[in-house]
């Protein structure tokens, strides 16, 4: 069963009655409740993946700072923040580099709010997805504190046999590529695929190399087993083009 979670009651209700946002949400529920679909989230086949140990860091700071796992004694370092920089690159700079939530304090607060940003075939995994979950990927980023050994083996196989492009900092290099650990940037062919070794996964050289896999700058693409859904974002980022 697919569920949608809508937060922030004050936005939906004002003076005891539904606000314009609340009425829009109610209309959406009435229009789509009970209508079957021939696909679900289980049929999603991402083409771009971010693999990261889920340490609960989404860029919280200032009033919302609690540290990793909500523990103020566990301070994040650059590894915890890598995935946010990658998402910023994948959204063509339209999301924040330091946070990925409205409850943030960063440079994006100075910009006009956008409800939608480009997101083309992206999925964010934890540190231990299996071969089946990763098999549709054309591009993978290895980020964060750690990636499980069995997942690393799957990534290595997909690079060699499926033509996967894997972007990772030197600490995630396979043993046979350990001689590259002193490098801050390198491109290493491996079977049908490619390893991009980059100390900064959002390096401009990485972006230029992977740009053909990122889709359009004003589009959200959701690939499923039997269809691909494309949503064209209007210029202000608040709605979709008809």
Image (spheres, helix red, strand yellow):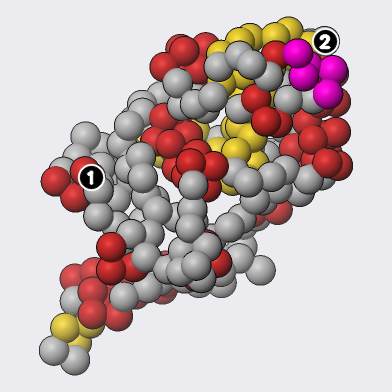
Residue 118 at x, y percent in the picture: 39, 36
Residue 80 at x, y percent in the picture: 52, 47
9, above or below 77, in the image: below
Residue 95 at x, y percent in the picture: 34, 41
Q: Which residue is mark 2?
A: 191
Q: Foreground residue, 130 or 231?
A: 130
Using a 10 Å C-alpha cutoff, classify the residue at mark 2 as few (fewer than 14 neighbours), some (14 to 19) or many (20 or more): some
Is 230 on the left or on the right of 37, as rendered?
A: left
36, above or below 18, in the image: above
174, above or below 96, in the image: above
169, above or below 41, in the image: above
**Is residue 147 visible in this depiction of the protein?**
yes
Does residue 31 show up magenta in the picture? no
Q: In the structure shown, which secondary structural element does the residue marked by tag 1 occupy?
A: helix
The residue shown at (56%, 14%) is 185
The residue shown at (83%, 23%) is 175
Q: CA distance from mark 2 to mark 1?
A: 41 Å
Using a 10 Å C-alpha cutoff, classify the residue at mark 1 as few (fewer than 14 neighbours), some (14 to 19) or many (20 or more): some
The residue shown at (70%, 31%) is 172
The residue shown at (63%, 9%) is 187
Is 176 on the left or on the right of 193, as rendered?
A: right
Q: Which residue is mark 1?
A: 108
The magenta stretch is: 175-179
Q: Which quarter of the figure is the N terminus placed in?
A: bottom right
Q: In the structure shown, which secondary structural element does the residue marked by tag 2 occupy?
A: loop
Is 133 on the left or on the right of 211, as rendered?
A: right
């Amino acid at each position: 069963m697919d569920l949608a979670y809508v937060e922030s009651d004050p936005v939906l209700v004002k003076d005891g009655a539904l606000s314009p946002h609340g009425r829009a949400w109610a209309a959406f529920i009435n229009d789509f409740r009970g209508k079957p679909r021939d696909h679900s989230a289980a049929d999603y086949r991402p083409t771009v993946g971010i693999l990261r140990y889920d340490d609960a860091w989404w860029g919280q700071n200032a009033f919302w700072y609690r540290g990793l796992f909500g523990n103020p004694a566990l301070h994040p370092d650059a590894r915890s923040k890598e995935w946010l920089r990658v998402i910023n690159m994948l959204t063509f700079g339209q999301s924040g580099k330091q946070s990925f939530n409205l409850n943030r304090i960063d440079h994006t607060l100075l910009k006009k709010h956008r409800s939608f940003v480009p997101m083309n075939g992206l999925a964010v995994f934890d540190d231990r997805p299996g071969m089946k979950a990763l098999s549709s990927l054309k591009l993978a980023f290895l980020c964060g504190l750690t990636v499980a050994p069995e997942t690393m083996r799957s990534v290595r196989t997909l690079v060699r046999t499926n033509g996967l492009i894997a972007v990772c900092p030197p600490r995630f290099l396979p043993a046979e590529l350990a001689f590259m650990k002193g490098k801050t940037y390198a491109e290493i062919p491996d079977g049908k695929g490619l390893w991009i070794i980059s100390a900064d996964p959002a390096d401009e050289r990485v972006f230029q190399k992977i740009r053909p896999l990122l889709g359009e700058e004003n589009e959200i693409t959701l690939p499923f087993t039997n269809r691909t859904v494309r949503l064209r974002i209007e210029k202000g980022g608040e709605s979709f083009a008809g």
